[in-house]
Image (tube, rainbow, N blue to C red):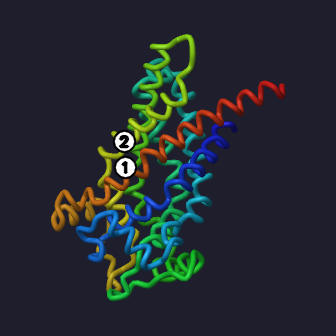
Amino acid sequence: MFNLLSGGVAGTVAACITNPLEIIRTQLQSSSSSFANNSPVMVAQKVFETSGLSGFFKGLQPTLIGIIPARSIYFFTYENTKRKLGKLPSFNEGSFGNSLIAGFTAGIASNTVTNPIWMVKTRVQLLADQSVGQRSYAGYGDAVSSIFKKEGIAGFYKGIVASYWGCAEGAIQFLIYEQLKKKMKQSSSSKPPSKLQLFCSAAVAKGIAAVVTYPHEVARTRLREQAREGVFRYSGMWQTIGLIAKEEGRSGLYGGMGVHLMKVVPNSAIMFLTYEVVNIWLGQFSVKET
C-alpha cells in the first residue's frame, strides 16, 4: 500500500513541475513542418503565440488523472515483482536479473492500463495543422469523442507497442538506480544514502536509459498524431521508425531529445526522491501507529 501511495504522490509532483518542457518536446517530435529544424526556444514562442501561457499546460489534466494510477501501478508492480523474484535463488533483490525483470513488468502493467489517457494527452498537446485537415479540440471531452468516432476503441491504444518498447527504458533505469543504491550502501554501511545521493542516482539512471531507448518516444508521438488529409501516415512502431529513418535520418529519430532529457531527468529524479521520502515517512508513521 505504501508503494502505491508513494508512487502516486511522486509522479504528481514531478509531472506538475515539468509539463511545459513536455509540450515543447512533443512538438519537436511531431511530423509537422511548422517545427522542422526549429530550436526549443522557437517552438516555445510559437506555442505562446498560438495558445498563450496556458498552452504550456495542455495535457496536464489527463496527466494528473493518469499519473497517480500509472506511477502507483508502476511502483507497486515493481516492488512486488522484485520481492517475489527475490525468493528465487538466482534473482535476489538488487541483482541484475531481478531489477531488469521487475522494471520491465512494471512498465507493461502501467502502460496497458493507462495508454488511453496518454493518447488523449498527446493529441491535445500537439498543435493542429488545419491546412491538412487537422482540427483543434475544444477540450478533453471533444478529443475523446472525436477519437472514438473516427478511430474507434483502437484509436485510444495507438502507440502502445512503442510504449511497451519504452518499458526497456524503465527496466534499464531501475537496474542502474538499484546498482547505484547498492554501491552507496556498501560504501557507507553505517547510514542510508542521502537525499542528494538518491536524487543524483535517479538522474544518472534516467539519463542513460532515455538516451539508449529514445527513438520509441518519437515513434509513439507520430503514431498518436491526427490524420493528415484523412490519412494516417504511421501505422506501426517499426514502420514508423523505418519511415522516419529513411526520410529524416538520425536527426528525425532523435528530434527533441535535448528537451526530453531536460524534462525527464529532473522529473525522474524528483519522482524517485519523493517516492523514497514518502515511502520512508509512511513506514515510520505505520510503526508509530502500531
Residue plotted at (60% across, 43% down): 7
Q: Are marks 2 and 1 in contact (CB under 8 Å)?
A: yes
CA separation in Å, label 2 and label 1? 7 Å
**Dot 2 corresponds to which residue?**
207
**Dot 1 corresponds to which residue?**
261
Quadrant in the picture for residue 74? top right
Above or below — where is 173 with respect to 66? Answer: above
Farthest top residue? Answer: 190
Residue 254: image location, x then y, percent: 26, 56
Q: Amino acid at mark 2?
A: Gly
Q: Is residue 252 left or right of residue 146?
A: left
Q: Considering the numbered disc 1 on the image, is that residue within a helix, a strand or a loop?
A: helix
Residue 47: image location, x then y, percent: 42, 73
Q: Considering the numbered disc 2 on the image, is that residue within a helix, a strand or a loop?
A: helix
Above or below — where is 56 with respect to 228? Answer: above
Q: Earlier in the sequence, mark 2 or mark 1?
A: 2
Residue plotted at (41% across, 28% down): 97
Quarter holding the C terminus is top right
Q: Which mark is residue 230?
A: none
